[in-house]
Image (cartoon, rainbow, N blue to C red):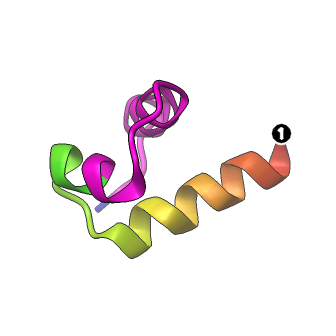
Amino acid sequence: MTWTPLTIRRLVLLADCGFSIREIAFLTGLRRTQVAGKLHRIRRSS
């Protein structure tokens, strides 16, 4: 799995809309640990 800007934007958009990590993982087909880790890094850097 490569993290494209579009994939990252989609994760952030879903999270901002109030979706849980589990729901985002289901919608994007990613593992929950991947979603959680990526969102954590994005939130920390911004």
The correct choice, above or below, for 8 with respect to 10 in the image is below
Q: Which residue is mark 1?
A: 46
Please give the range of residues in magenta. Answer: 2-24
The correct choice, above or below, for 34 with respect to 5 in the image is below
Residue 14's spot in the image, x, y percent? 41, 31
Q: Is residue 40 left or right of residue 29?
A: right
Instruction: State the quadrant of the C terminus.
Output: top right
Question: Residue drawn at (42%, 50%), measured in percent from left and top?
Answer: 3
Mark 1 surroundings: few (<14), some (14-19) or many (≥20) residues within 10 A: few
Question: Residue drawn at (18%, 43%), measured in percent from left and top?
Answer: 27
- Of residues 31 and 16, the one nearer the viewer is 16
Residue 21's spot in the image, x, y percent? 40, 56
Mark 1: secondary structure: loop
Residue 17's spot in the image, x, y percent? 46, 24
- Type of residue at label 1? Ser
- Of residues 25 and 45, the one nearer the viewer is 25
